[in-house]
Image (cartoon, rainbow, N blue to C red):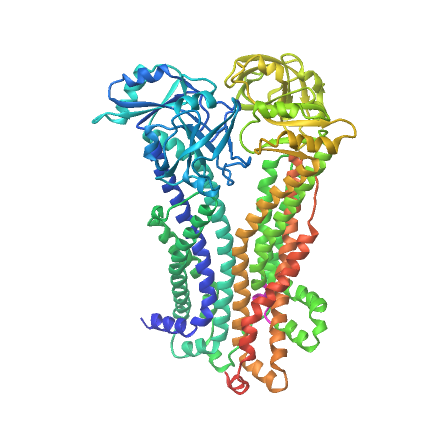
Amino acid sequence: MTVLKTSLRNFLAHKGRMALSAVAVLLSVAFVSGTLVFTDTMNTTFDKLFAATAADVTVSPESAEAEDETPQSGRPETLPASLLTKVEKARGVKSAEGGVVSMSVTVVDADNKNMGSSNGAPTIAGNWTRGELRTMEITSGHAPRGPTDVMVDADTAEKHKLRIGDELRTIAVTGDFTARISGIASFKVTNPGAAVVYFDTATAQRELLGRTGEFTHIAVTAAAGVSHEQLKTNVAAVAAGPYKFQTQAEAADAGREDVGGFLDVMKYAMLGFAGIAVLVGIFLIVNTFSMLVAQRTREIGLMRAIGSSRRQVNRSVLIEALFLGLVGSVAGVGAGVGLAVGLMELMSSMGMNLSTSDLTVKWTTPVIGLVLGVVVTVLAAYIPARRAGKVSPMAALRDAGTPADGRAGLVRGVIGLVLTGAGGAALWTATRADEATEGSMWLGLGVVLSLIGFIVVGPLLAGGVVRVLSAVVLRVFGPVGKLAELNALRNPRRTGATGAALMIGLALVACLSVVGSSMVASATEELDKSVGADFIVQSTNGPIVPQAQQALEKAPGIAHVTEYKGVKATLTAPDGTSTDDEWLVAADPTYAQDLRRETVAGELAAAYGKDAMSVGETYADKHGVKVGDTMTVAFRGGGTAKLRVAAVTSDDTNVDKGAMYMAIGTAERYFTPERMPKNMMMFAEAEEGKEKEAYQDLKDALAAYPQYRVLDQTDFKQDLKDQVGQLLNIVYGLLALAIIVAVLGVVNTLALSVVERTREIGLMRAIGLSRRQLRRMIRLESVVIALFGALLGLGLGMGWGTAAQQLLALEGLGVLDIPWPTILYVFVGSAFVGLVAALVPAFRAGRMNVLNAIATE
């Protein structure tokens, strides 16, 4: 009980000094808890959505694509309307309705503006049925009654300021058609972000499917007392055929599986960044308790002199850490719930309206948050606690203040150098790997070992690096700069730990910057070398519809237009092995001009001959395929072909790597016209000297189709750069949490250092140091510590990034590009971070009363 009271008294006595460490625990726990609450809430939301939208039993074509996959033909798989009559007669059926749903559509308003979602969610078009009333409610106007009526969801109407009577044009593979808004329907459940339009059944069949008398699915409702499983059995008995039968639970599970992968990736990615923040927070906590123990050396010595054992002193410090962990963790769990609500609001602003009524806080979330915060804090305080237990009773006779052991230990330095060397060797081994899988293992090992090595050897490096930085940055400030340098050097262990916290976040920033910049540079070089087409036409929503293709082909000033279709198939090699869901490229022969591909055997032009194809080098080596061999190709949605291998293409590229080519004419022989895949993209070559005019002509030709983009090679490169940049910005945003915690560490270190040096500061003020000079000294000390951490982090990160790029070179990304402007901005920004971190400690130091400071023991 005495130890507990002592610990509580010390904790409350130093609560100001503990505050920033508590904030670090709070932030780390909040990020973990917020991630868990947010993803659990998303799961709850989608569970409710899938349960509400699924009928008791759903009948769909067996070959239908996944719900989130757009058919390459642009037409959904269908059922005959005659099947509906059979289903209605099955025992236990209360009612059955035929549904039509297509996601291969684009809806534009009278100004040709795309009404689709901007967050990547699809535009969904279908027929209005009674079953839609489970999830939608007509809040204005009426349901569609004929070919000139369309109903839209309320969120889309509000976002685009649509009103009843406005005209909308729907673009589908069957053609364009217009209708006026007859009604607006609101979601009863969470809007997943999609734009939804409804037509009457006949119009939906004719315009979306190309013919009447077909449905994409049949929704069946059970009569009273009939279970879903029994209804499924009864319906399957009367509707024998190539159909898929799902109960409500099975349909919901399938939908959950579709989004589950994405949610899991997001969850574990965010938890990974939270883990980095936790690691950085450990340094802050270690520093805090190390300095508190050092400042209480005399107090601890007195405790030992009056009978406290080493174990009791050790336990006292650990109990203080326990209190810190509990306070920070409890606040962190609460903040995590707030963070989850904030993320929900952010998602709502992007079009996915998540309701706080679905907020899901499982009992495991606060438990995980509390355990994580407490365990991390206590473990971080263990070494300072052991150090406190070793304080002897004679320490009571010494002056309090700076700890006796301010030097970095020789043994620690040797261990750090060994670990760093081992990490460097592992990274070098990764760059020499012949396969990416093997190399990635060495890369991971090298990153871990080198990071730990730099952390351990940090105090040893502090002396030399800080002196060099001081010579460049601090000496211009005269004696004040020299004092700041000496303060940073007086405890290398503390400086090393403070710099290491910042080093971790900046190392990851530098690594990702090198990798991202190298990817862009490699792809740009590859495009310059391989892509011969002047223009690329890309789609943001489904395949390119025939009417848009025709408009492209009629554009003036174009030497040729190349079609490019993706075809899924099951391939059987001559060795008898089969692989499912392989993508083949069906293209015009002019594609060989649009994309220059080297071959290791045969001629690529021959692959565009009748019943011929090419394979990639990796596939050929794996399955022993040679030019002249015959491949069995079972097309999804089409027939089975025997195709002769006419060429083997080199995989020493990052454009179309591993692609298998064939002529469009070959593919057309094994598909019906309706099921033949549409173009995924198209390429165009301008007539000589007419590139500028052709560029504008192509854009004008597609002006009526806002879902397509015409890119020249400059646009394409910039698009690639922007995509990588957006991804990196998201990662940098998540890493910002770790950097914020590291900045708190700098603030805490300086604040505790000021308290530790109270008497020293008073003496300096007494012999003539002005308040302005004192504040500048502390700010400069902070700057040099921040630059020390930045220098280590950026150097380490560039090493990681260089090794990672060498692995990417095995995948065709062979250009190493170090983004020096970004590295320089981060380094200079670190100095600014140091200045900001020192503002409060410097202000408090400047306000000290000189006489009281001198009298401090």
Report whether residue 431 is seen: no
- Residue 26 coordinates in the image, percent (x, y): 44, 60
Decide whether the magenta segment is chiefly helix, strand or loop.
helix
- Residue 553 placement (x, y as % from top left): 66, 23
Quadrant for residue 847, please give it. Answer: bottom right
Image coordinates of residue 604 in percent, x first then y, are: 70, 20
Q: Is residue 733 above or below residue 1?
A: above
- Residue nearest the viewer, comparing 436 with 31: 31
Say if 153 sits above or below 559 in the image. Answer: below
Q: Residue at x 57, y 59 (%)?
A: 502
In the image, the segment drawn in magenta is: 490-496
Q: Quadrant of the N terminus?
A: bottom left
Front one among 500 and 68: 68
Q: In the figure, is residue 31 to the left or right of 593?
A: left
Q: Is residue 305 magenta?
A: no
222 to the left or right of 569: left
Residue lying farthest to the front in this orientation: 165
Residue 647 in which image quadrant:
top right
Above-or-below relation of 107 to 13: above
Residue 258 visible, this orientation: yes
What is the residue that sits farthest to the left in this orientation?
225
| Coordinates of residue 810 in the picture (x, y in percent) | 65, 35
Vertical position of residue 397 compared to residue 475: above or below: below
Between 165 and 795, which is closer to the camera in this rendering?
A: 165
Q: How many marks?
A: 0
